[in-house]
Amino acid sequence: MRVIARLDIKNEDVIKGINFEGLRVMGKPNYLAKKYYNEGADELIYSDCVASLYGRNNLSKFVESAAKDIFIPITVAGGIRNKKDAELLMKNGADKLAINTELFKNDNLGKELIKKYGSQSILLSIQAKKISRDSWEAYINFGRDRTNMDVEEWVKKMVPSNFGELLLTSIDADGLSNGFDVELYEKICKIVNIPIIACGGFGKLIHIKELKKFADVDAISISKALHYNKINIGEIKNYIKKND
Amino acid sequence: MTNKIVVIDYGVGNILSIKNAVSYHGYTSHITNKKKDIESASHIILPGVGAFPAAMKKLKDLDLINPILEAANKKTYLLGICLGMQLLFTNSEEFETTEGLNLIKGNIIKLDKFNSNFDSKLPNIGWRNCKIDTKKNNISILKNVLSNDEFYFVHSYGLYNYENDLNLVKSNYGNIEIPAVINYKNIYGCQFHPEKSGPQGLKVLKNFLNL
Amino acid sequence: MKNSSLYGLPENVIFCKLCVISNQRPSSTVEFKSSGGESKSGISINDNGICDACSYNKKKSEINWKEREKQLLKFLEKYRKNNGDYDCIVPSSGGKDSSFTAHILKKKYNMNPLAVTWAPNMWTEEGFENFNNLSRVGGVDSILITPNGRLHSYLTKISFLNFGHPFQPFIHGQKIIGPKMAKKLNIPLVIYGENQAEYGNKLEDNLSHYMNNQFFSVEDDFNFKDIKFGGKSIQSIIEEKKFNFKNFSTYLPLQKKEVSDSKIQMIFLGYFEKWDPQECFYYASENTGFRPAKERSDGTYSKYTEIDDKIVPIHFYTTFIKFGIGRASYDAAQEIRNHKITRDEGINLVKKFDGEFPKTYFKDFLDYIEISEEQFIKKIDELRSPHLWEKIKNEWVLKESIYKKNF
């Protein structure tokens, strides 16, 4: 199970919210990225959280400087609208791109990018909010707008585009360190056969055990627990090895 | 002779990371698709991400196939990374059966065909170690690499058929074994991405650059 | 030159250089004495182009908060009860600021607060959850006062139809409920969170931790029947409608004499704590089970500000129509001052969201006050001051907006 460090970036800072709200500053992207790389992170996710405001992703310069001395895969998310946006990021050192909002306007974008960069480079990103005991709704614009689209339905519709992985984030669990939304992953793992990254809610090592009991996810993405120095990546990886 | 490190840019792959990884070791790399650079190279890195047929077409369109073949025959050190490694072989069945560079005999097939009971997810994405026998290892780019060092893999196809004299080290994924590092004379290949595998990946790259 | 502003606000629209608010932002008034037609005073923008709220914000950074905390501790000592009785009332909406206030008074300052909630017009789902969580999760005792719904919706209706201010009856009740309950329950201390002066009432209002008592009490010789809602006095409502004077008891403020006799003190915690609404959100999320709304509210990008009442979006829509300042402007101005976003981001947010039609709860609002969509649109258009609005190709357009000016 891969351990991925996620950095939500606004302008020059890494921020961390709760339920995708709030802009509390956590530090500088380059500093935190290096720190997590040195602690043994398997991958990094750079997420532009104000991309929808400006209509574009603004992270290429961070990716470029990270790529200079951080040698693990970097995924970039947020505001990737078209081939041009994708190209700029890939050119500057991004290994993978995650797309969400734009797919609701142009559901072919995935296919287009996959054709150019390959399946393994393009991730389907979903921000899920629980709306009933066993259904979730997909959100866009960094958790601010509803789509009225059921997550399960959306997954079934999009997966045939051939995305390499699914980055599935729980809005409800985000930033609360109370554990993953296990039911969400349990449900979605059953209907897709591509690697799934669970994102949102990690606070304690036991949360990983609880998740694995019900869902066969391939990676976990962590932000709050790392930014607040509650745990370091080495501890998480050791725990995963021990409990395999 | 001073080293001239060439990274072939044929529009496919994360060139920047390779460039940065090479710089990390204090070397300069020439990112190029010019025949004369390839001819004068001491070390050539062939990256690759995406689909086999598209990559071969790009090499063809840029007239790079012959320069690469000639360099290989001249004993220039050649390192194929991920798809770049797959291109070194005879053919691949990705999308349609496409011919590769055929520098080494072998076929590339989809991982789920390696074993009829294969039930893992595709692509194979993750950090895996290589089954290195440190006593018997004779692949020079794996010098000082430990058997529990993990490397970053991301692929759906792999090398399946090959000749007995191909030197290689495998990696496990689910219930199959995938050739992870190959070596044939002056030609090397990594199915994983050494430029994305942290310090241990950098070690492998360094070994190659020091050849 | 005749002032073409409908509300007596400055004719020229000037935007603050630091935030996104304009000089059209009206200051708080004593709502229940208003019969309409009075000129409103807008927020001051000084010669350097800085608004009062931003000026105060600058001063905030110069305050010695350690000193203030010492003052608070000393002050609270006089009121703290250790025998299980409530020693302070915290007027609470269940929102982030009041949840922060109530919880921190209990946890950090060892007080025994009773949260007092004046019910919103119409609870939103998340609003009601958050209100309950203050007790369930935050561990704060609370009581809820829900006024007579038939009267309240009627008052809301006339406030909207007469003034375009549907929120007036709610605000009225919210201002007086703290002191009223303090007197009823014999709890002599009422602690509010933020001082509204932070947002641009007169700067002098910020110099004290005491609330200006004109907002919650009346002169001893004041005739309660003169209290006005939507410009209509209780007296005239009684004469016209099926309500009696006794129906209005919840709406009657205390008399000044009652306040002084019961020695009730009303203070702002915001005088003693460096107020940051977004930090209140974090605190409340982590301590009182506060959750933001499912999605951003109509007219703004925010999910955590004022999410308890379904008519809040309508309220902000009317401020947009009347003063050219919508919800996104208010939210952005606050976040700019607290260094969460840059002014440039604020301008973009205003451009994107300000004045968005409040569609989510629009039907609920129409049903609540029993008017038709046509009546709503008609009233809205009557509220447009000619100095702010013009019609271009049959669409109403703001003459001035911060993203047009963008200086």
Image (spheres, coloured by chain):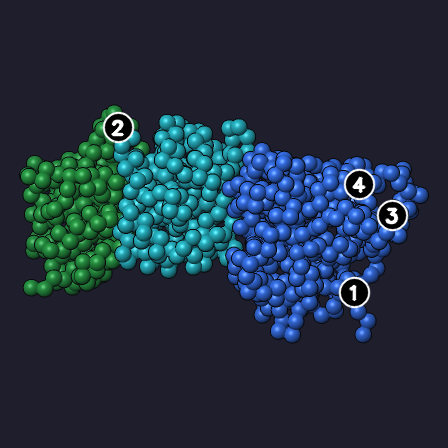
Chain colours: A cyan, B green, C blue
Amino acid carrying mark 1 in the image:
Gly
Asked if badge 1 and badge 3 are on a common chain, one would say yes
Q: Which residue is mark 3?
A: C224
Residue B118 percent location from the top left of the image: 26, 28
Question: Left or right: A100 with respect to C103?
Answer: left
**Chain containing the residue with disc 2:** B
Residue for badge 1: C8
Q: Dot 1: what SS?
A: loop
Quarter holding residue B108: top left
Q: Which residue is mark 2?
A: B118
* Mark 1 to mark 4 CA distance (whole Å): 32 Å
Q: Secondary structure at mark 4?
A: helix
The type of residue carrying mark 4 is: Thr
Ranked by sequence position, the earlier of labels 1 and 3 is 1
Mark sitting on residue C250: 4
- Report helix, strand or loop for mark 2: loop
Tell me how far mark 2 sits from mark 3, CA to CA.
83 Å
Q: Which of the marked residues, 4 or 3, is nearer the chain's N terminus?
A: 3
Real-space CA distance between mark 1 and mark 2, rounded to the nearest whole angstrom: 78 Å
Judged by depth in the image, the label closer to the viewer, 4 or 2, is 4
